[in-house]
Image (spheres, helix red, strand yellow):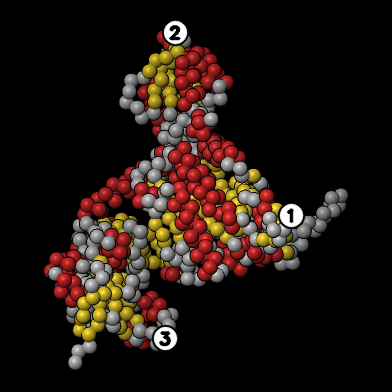
Amino acid sequence: MTKMFKIALPDGSVREMPEGSTPADVAAAIGPGLAKAALAAKVDGEVRDIMRPFEGDASLALITSRDEKDALELVRHDFAHVLAEAVQNIFPGTQITFGPATDDGFYYDFAPAPGRGPFTEEDLPVIEEEMRRVIAADKPLVREVWDRERVRRFFIDHGETFKAEWVMELPEGEPITMYKTGHGEADWMDLCRGPHLASTGKLDPSAFKLTRVSGAYWRGDPKNPMLSRVYGTAWLNKKQLEAHLVRLEEAAKRDHRKIGQEMDLFHLQGEAHGSVFWHPNGYIIWRQLEAYMRRRLDAAGYLEVKTPQLMDARQWERSGHWGKYRENMFIVPDEIPHGSDDEDTDEQPILSGDADLMALKPMNCPAHVLIFNQGIKSYRDLPLRLAEFGCCHRNEPHGALHGILRVRQFTQDDAHIFVTEDQLVDEVVEFCDLLDSVYRDLGFDSYAIKLALRPDKRFGSDEMWDWSEQSLRDAVAATGRNTEQFGWEELPGEGAFYAPKLEFHLTDAIGRTWQVGTIQTDTVLPERLDASYIGEDGQKHRPVMLHRAIIGTFERFLGILIEHYAGKFPLWLAPVQVVVTTIVSDADDYARDVATKFAERGIRVETDIRNEKINYKVREHSLKKVPLLLVVGKREAEEGTVALRRLGSEERQLVMTVDEAISMITEEAVAPDLKRS
Ligand SMILES: [Zn+2]
Ligand SMILES: [Zn+2]
């Protein structure tokens, strides 16, 4: 008798299916529409091939293109296989290595055939054509389970040395899955965990585009051979692809590195990988933002501190960073100078090998606990909110760095709040309100709130986790922002190893999201560094520590701001707010007088009295994104007026008296928080 499996469906119904049947059979039994639409299956929560037989009783949810996140990942992975097959069809002798799905598509790393050289952009159209052919052939993607030795022999026989090397690192004895594209003996195969769609024909041939090529080391190690990486973007349909390409084009126009150069804000150079050289214009924006944040924190009861850049290795051992974090820390030997001032000596300081080690701080948390630990704290001192615009260093591979968005030296708007357990929810509510107001002031009306829950590997008891997760959940509920409008979502498994956290994701002007804000509870570090306060009961208690940031880091946030505004900053942030420019040289003195009056009122003003055509000057200042131009000629000089032009405005210029212009512009230039007060 055939064995029957009980398959539970999302609607609560249960179907009996004979052994050997697959999710595709269930889809077909439900109806032909679903059979066609189903791309893959979630079996007991795991995404699997739709043709993979059930192994016993199971719960089943069929994945269709409506389940966008899962569907996109499957489709992108399939495209990577199709790309690899297409490349090997056209360029025999090319070796395959790895090809995962990415956030907007896929890539595949190839070792080009000997003597062929790396792939170039010119190869892409030909490869795309071949990919369309593979898709049109509607080849099945078949999962097979092999043992390791068979996989190794297969790849060696096919001249695939990279794959043969890799498979030997998989655990011996465990079954390995191979995916075959097609039915026949000589079909294309890749070592792959899967899952995949049932056939290449499930892909939309108009929903992908190969975008670029780059070099990438085998397994990311510069000691290994350089491979040739081909990138593509892939979507469920043509409409999604086109929308994405428009977004890319828009993003390229807003690229902070391009605008940073046009506006002369900052630069980066190889002598200081991942550390930003802020130019005067860029640092003005930084200072405005910092002054704004400082006012908001002062008003919210934070106390600002400044802590050491270098601390002893022993301190990092105590806080646990040395063990977990060392490879990201910059280590500095504490070399002791010989210090004989009056002697002319060639003696060197004690050499690194003998010196004690110190490290540049990768985060401010331990130093803030050390401040908390000075003197005895009572429950009356709590909540204690210690803030620092803390400059930190973290070592990252050069390849991971990206403009000012991903750097090695950065300044956080960091703060740590020490609270009693009873104060936690209220304090998180206050933080959420402050953050909401800051984001709106800075021009972001839309953001999402997510709660990252306990990961598998974690510190602390389940009780502690239940309590912290529920506290954060309660706090967001109390603000009324646990709604769809705020993208409220709980993310299982994504919390830090010591605590859950709230994440705040901004949506920018072109719909991209950026995680910037965060608040997380921590009972581990207060324990490790023995922080305590005297409670109402006269006993010692551990405070709970909240790590929190609103804008995250200044560098990254300024990069986001540049791209969000495309350089067209609101007046209070703009580096140069006003340029007074002349039509004729007769008005030079008048232009200087007008500029002086603005400068006296604290407006950041420049004059442009170069003997150039006015249209040329206007174009140049609009490229530099100067918000306001005051054009003056002979007539304005005689009448004491200016002609005002706004950046990007189609309106005709507005003529007004100098006093009118000053009062209008000084009012507009006030920071949003000061406007309210
Ligand atoms: Zn694969
Ligand atoms: Zn912290």
Q: What residue does disc 1 label?
A: 376
> Looking at numbered disc 3 in the image, what kind of residue is underneath it?
Glu
Q: Nearer the viewer, mark 1 or mark 2?
A: 1
- Respond yes or no on whether mark 2 lies under 8 Å from ligand 2: no
Report if residue 416 is visible in the image.
no
- Tell me what residue is drawn at x 39 percent, y 23 percent: 645
Q: Amino acid under label 1?
A: Ile
Secondary structure beneath dot 2 equals helix
Residue 653: image quadrant is top left
Q: Residues within 10 Å of mark 2 (few under 14, many from 20)?
A: few
Identify the disc placed on residue 241: none
Residue position for label 2:
639
Q: In the image, which disc is placed on residue 172?
A: 3
- Mark 3, Cα crowd under 10 Å, few <14 / some 14-19 / many 20+, is few
Question: Percent x, y for residue 32?
Answer: 13, 69
Label 1 SS: loop
Q: Hey, what amino acid is under mark 2?
A: Glu
Query: Horizontally, is 291 left or right of 559 in the view?
Result: right
Of residues 529 and 131, the one drawn nearer to the viewer in this rendering: 529
- Mark 1 surroundings: few (<14), some (14-19) or many (≥20) residues within 10 A: few
**In which quarter of the view is residue 197 placed?**
bottom left
Q: Could you tell me if residue 666 is visible in this image?
A: yes
Mark 3: secondary structure:
loop
Front in this rendered view, residue 273 or 136:
136
C-alpha span from label 3 to label 2: 89 Å
Where is residue 534, by image quadrant?
A: bottom right
Q: Residue at x 39, y 44 (%)?
A: 446
